[in-house]
Image: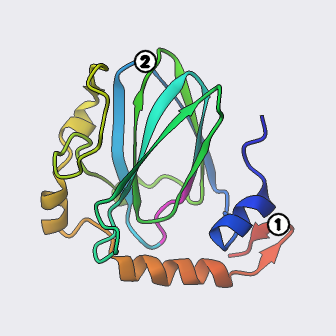
Amino acid sequence: MEWYRHEALTEAVGHPLHLAQANCSVSRRGVLRGVHFAQVPPSQAKLVTCVHGAVLDAVVDLRVGSPTFGAVELVRLDDVDRNVVYLAEGLGHAFLSLADGSVVTYLCSEVYRPDREHAVHPADPALGIGWPADVEQNLSEKDAAAPTLARASAAGLLPSYEDCQAWYATLRDRPVVNNCPAG
């Protein structure tokens, strides 16, 4: 399975993806992870796929001031259709495992920095994520304790659309050497 090609992603998103870290998670049916996001700049762009099993992946626009603030896009990622999701900096990410042993892999533009990582509760009714009712949801203690969208916003945790747009402009302007963004 080829799930990343530098030229194709660069053309699709308008700038190359600097690869700084790769992650892999294994989840049993019903594990609900997210909605995770990092402070901008630099935040963490992600390219996500499910190489075994199936998950319902959610991309949430958490950028305050965005014309699509609060919008959710759901995509089934599985080992049959082999879809891939790109998450730009400032977007939130969550997924619900639909099968035991679901393996989700991530390519990340920046390394994980726990002090810059935040979350919004994935079952917050304000988000209106359409998690399937027939899958019992299991959250980690950390995700269960995550604030609602309103509380995260009031605490100033959410990225601004303006800051994200400024960051995206710097990504488009980075020089590329040997298919890798410099800097």
Q: Residue at x 23, y 32 (%)?
A: 141
Q: As displayed, is residue 5 above or below residue 39?
A: above
Which residue in the structure is indicated by mark 2? 28
Q: Is residue 95 above or below residue 132?
A: below
**Residue 43 colored in magenta in the image:** yes
Q: Quadrant of the N terminus?
A: top right
Quick one: 153 or 40, which is closer to the camera? 153
Q: Which mark is residue 47?
A: none
Q: Which mark is residue 179?
A: 1
For residue 164: magenta? no
Region of the chain picked out in magenta, as a range: 42-46
Residue 1 shown left or right of residue 133 in the figure: right
- All told, the count of numbered labels is 2
**Residue 19 seen from this side:** yes
Q: Residue at the spot x=22%, y=45% of the render?
A: 121
Which corner quadrant holds the C terminus?
bottom right
Tell me where residue 21 appears, x and y as whole percent. 61, 50
Q: Residues within 10 Å of mark 2 (few under 14, many from 20)?
A: some
Q: CA distance from mark 1 to mark 2?
A: 36 Å
Q: How is the image coloured?
A: rainbow
Question: Reading the chain from its start, which is encountered first: label 1 or label 2?
Answer: 2
Q: Main secondary structure of the magenta part?
A: loop
Q: Determine whether, in the image, residue 109 is placed left or right of residue 126.
A: right
Residue 77 in which image quadrant: top right
Give the left or right position of residue 152, taking residue 117 as reference.
Answer: left
Q: Residue at x 72, y 67 (%)?
A: 10
Q: Position of residue 101 (x, y in %)?
A: 52, 17
Which amino acid type corresponds to the residue marked 2 in the rendered image? Arg
Q: Can you give x and y, in whole percent of width and height, for residue 103 in the image? A: 56, 26
Q: What is the x, y in percent for residue 79?
A: 63, 26
